């Protein structure tokens, strides 16, 4: 399951004493500011979580896999995310606690 805006609003409502309207405004303002900063090519750093930044991609040639025809991919900007070391450690800790499904590749097929 994915974390959604509604889930964030409910967490603020249930665990932190905000009413639903305040929680919704808070979440919406946070994401609006995040989007505005990225639209202006500013990086957004959240301590203990990570950084969002805009990366400019150059023009390049691509190929349609169906027809094999070459075409030009226009230059564009994309949003990237780099996780902080704290977040990486937490993710690594959670994945290490998960038992392995199979010790050998494709063992589940037999």
Image (spheres, helix red, strand yellow):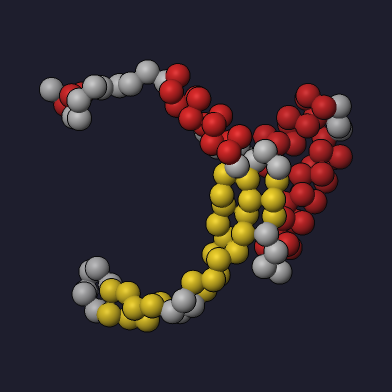
Q: Residue at x 60, y 42 (%)?
A: 84
| Quarter of image, res 42 | bottom right
Q: Is residue 91 left or right of residue 15?
A: left
Q: Residue furthest left?
A: 110
Q: Is residue 88 left or right of residue 63?
A: right
Q: Is residue 40 left or right of residue 19?
A: left
Q: Residue at x 75, y 56 (%)?
A: 32
Point out residue 99 in the picture as x, y percentages from the top left corner: 37, 18
29 to 49, vertically: above or below? below
Q: Residue at x 67, y 38 (%)?
A: 48
| Quarter of image, res 87 | top right
Point out residue 89 in the picture as x, y percentages from the top left corner: 54, 31
Point out residue 50 in the picture as x, y percentages from the top left corner: 63, 45
56 to 19, vertically: above or below? below
Viewer-nearest residue: 35 or 87: 87
Viewer-nearest residue: 58 or 65: 58
Q: Split into 4 quadrants, where in the image is the C terminus?
A: top left
Q: Residue at x 30, y 21 (%)?
A: 101
Residue 39 in view of the camera: no
């Amino acid at each position: 399951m994915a974390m959604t805006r509604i889930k964030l609003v409910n967490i603020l409502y249930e665990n932190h004493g905000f009413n639903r309207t305040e929680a919704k405004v808070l979440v919406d303002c946070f994401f609006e500011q995040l989007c505005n900063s990225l639209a202006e090519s500013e990086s957004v750093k959240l301590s203990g979580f990570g950084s969002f930044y805009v990366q400019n991609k150059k023009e390049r040639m691509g190929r349609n896999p169906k027809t094999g025809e070459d075409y030009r991919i226009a230059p564009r900007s994309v949003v990237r995310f780099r996780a902080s070391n704290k977040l990486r450690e937490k993710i690594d800790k959670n994945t290490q606690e998960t038992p392995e499904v199979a010790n050998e590749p494709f063992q589940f097929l037999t």
